[in-house]
Amino acid sequence: MNTAMSAGQRAQLLLKASSLDQELRWLGEQPANQPANTTFSGVTYPAQLPCTPKVTYTDGPDTVRGSTGVTGFPAQIGLAASWNTNLAYDKGKAQGDEAFRKGKNVVLGPGVSSGRTPLAGRTPEYLGEDSLLGGTLAAAQTNGLQKGNPDRPTMAVLKHYIGNEQELDRQTSSSNVDERTLREVYDLPFEVAIDGSSPGGVMCSYNQINGTYACENPLLTGNLKKQLGFDGYVVSDFGAVHSTTPSLKAGLDQELNRPLYYTPDKLKAALSAGQITRKQIDEAAYRVVKAYIKNGLFDHPLPTTPEDNVSTAAHKQVAQQIATEGSVLLKNDGNVLPLSSKAKTIAVIGQTASNTPTNGVSAATVCGMSGFGAGSCTTPPVAPLDAITARAAKTGASVIYDNGSDPAAAAATAAKADVAIVFGYSKMGEGSDRTNLNLDGNGDALISAVGGANHNTIAVLETGTAALMPWQKDVKGILEAWYPGEQQGTAIARLLWGDDNPSGRLPMTFPKSLADLPTQSSAQYPGVFADGSTTRPAGDTSIRQVNYTEGLAVGYKWYEENDIAPLYAFGYGLSYTSFSYRDLSVQATKQGIEVSYEVTNTGRRAGTDTGQVYVTLPKAAGEPGKRLAAFQEVELRPGQHKKVKVTIARSASDHPLSIWNSHKDAWTTPSGTYTLEAGSSSADLPLKKTTTLR
Ligand code: BGC
């Protein structure tokens, strides 16, 4: 308990004072975290050393899940759409504070993936399709969780490592991926997050990678711990362990929940059979203890009685800010938004606008994702209908509402109004994938009916992923609000009236059709069985083979490489003001490339621009499309301009100027011409220059 010593020294002293059986407790979540207990589902351990604190895990990554009286934050995909690292930190800090006060000091989150398919059920839980964006935001949230409340510390567990890109057969599928793709696409967001925040834990996923379960895959040591430099411990997903010896040897340090494979009996049998070594056990225990100590869990015990309500005004403000900054204005023809005081009658349409359910659907439905383990509002959210009604009253306007269950009736309501705001939603979450990107509850037909009846129609989308929008041309305005959490109404009303200026940018590509997705064949998604079929034969327990043959061409890189125009591009999002870019300067140095450009607010309102810099590597690198290499938020008053300077460093954790060389087992920077482009989205880059690296 000597805080003058390093976490590593303290962990070593503790383990030195432990018997083997006491040490083995650290390899299971329950025996590690409940030191006062000695029996777990019939498995018995000796009492733990007295200094050992109680530790309690809670699921993340969106809210403190499974607790009441906590803030219903928006889904993580909305946080990603804010592109705001400070906000991600604030969210982690608020979430950590709530967790601790609720008696939980490990948060199972944040999660990153590479957004291989927008159909993946957990898309709303992850941070989009780009490694730099997702990894940077995950790092910021982790820093908020781990460092935001020094007296009430929590530890983060980054998840799910790795190739966990679909829910369909997540426990019985193999993500088959070549080494270069694995490093450049799937490892990378983890690498950026780990480098930027040193999470205490990383959770291994359910699926197999190239035929070996993630939690017993040598990648845990070879890639995660060695290449990515992860120095915390690896904990399994719930029931994702399949063995004792292969798992420990591969680098799994702790089994989640009750001991099944990491029981003292099984571990000691493997030890005496010479299948595992004492050193491997020591290493696993050491990593767990060191992470707990390093993150303050030993020095700041959890409260004995959890508080009832931990959702403070400040936390609600963070939830509102994420909903605001994460909402993406996709279309605004004729400046239909912001709403003006000329609109005297406003029609609000759709089930998710209201707290009164229609066919079981209400604003609470889109508070967070659905599926098991769903993040949700523990109290009714601020419904858009209520917030819009209150805001409209300030300009003397009145609101008429229709729940949208009958598109014809909704259209008749819309026809009576000056402006129609129609809400569309789609549900998704853990446990299953979506089979389409259409809206649920007949939403596509509803929006087109309303759009046909009222020329000033604005669609507000509450989805966890991309939407196809067959009605896109029938409406003037489109706002993608994702799953906007408990403060949804306030955030949406403020955006509609321009009390806040939209600044969200898409963290994922919105395709025009399912046929345009990177996963072109059924062997790529949803994966196939031995007979080539995509449906599991009855009674069959074999592994679905999911072949990542699109390789590096994932997300916006796929669309660019194959000249497929998306519906809305990665990085895209409108504002009520406009920005222009000029004076790109690009300078190669020993460290990398120095880039600067100037951005000007050319409109009449203050606004936030998220400038983006993309780099295209020399042809010989064999990289599809270009990569996001930097992004920078800038707040500008009307007419104001600012110079933005960014360094694209060779040594950066996203390896912006390098490719993975499987022969050399290293990142290499190809010599040749690098093209730098800057602008407002992956598809709108007015500035371009080249430079040569040797
Ligand atoms: C999920 C994890 C989660 C765990 C514990 C699993 O079903 O895949 O993300 O952390 O449950 O709740």
Image: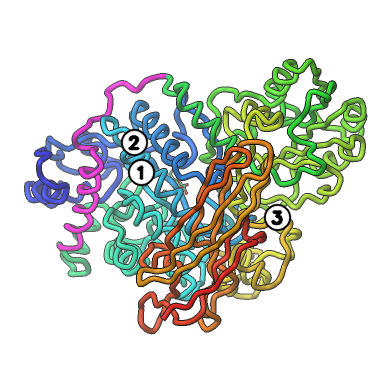
Q: Hey, what amino acid is under mark 2? A: Gly
Residue at image x 15%, y 46%?
22
The picture places residue 224, in percent across and down from the top left corner, at 34, 63
Q: How far separated are the C-alphas under marks 2 and 3?
A: 35 Å
* First along the sequence among labels 1 and 2: 1
Where does label 1 land, which residue? 143
Where is 136 relative to 271, above or below? above
Q: Classify mark 3: residues with Cα within 10 Å, few (<14), some (14-19) or many (20+).
A: many
| Left or right of 433, for residue 90 | left
Mark 2 highlights which residue? 148
Residue 528 in picture, x, y percent from top left: 62, 70
Part of the protein shown in magenta: 279-308
Asked if the magenta segment contains residue 681, the reply would be no
Q: How many marks?
A: 3
Q: Residue at x 68, y 22 (%)?
A: 387
Find disc 3 in the rendering and name its residue: 568
- Pointers 2 and 3 in contact (C-beta within 8 Å): no
Q: Dot 3 lies on which element?
A: loop
Disc 1 and disc 2: Cα gap in Å?
7 Å
Depth check: give the residue in front, 586 or 121: 586
Q: Residue 212 occupies which quadrant of the picture?
A: bottom left
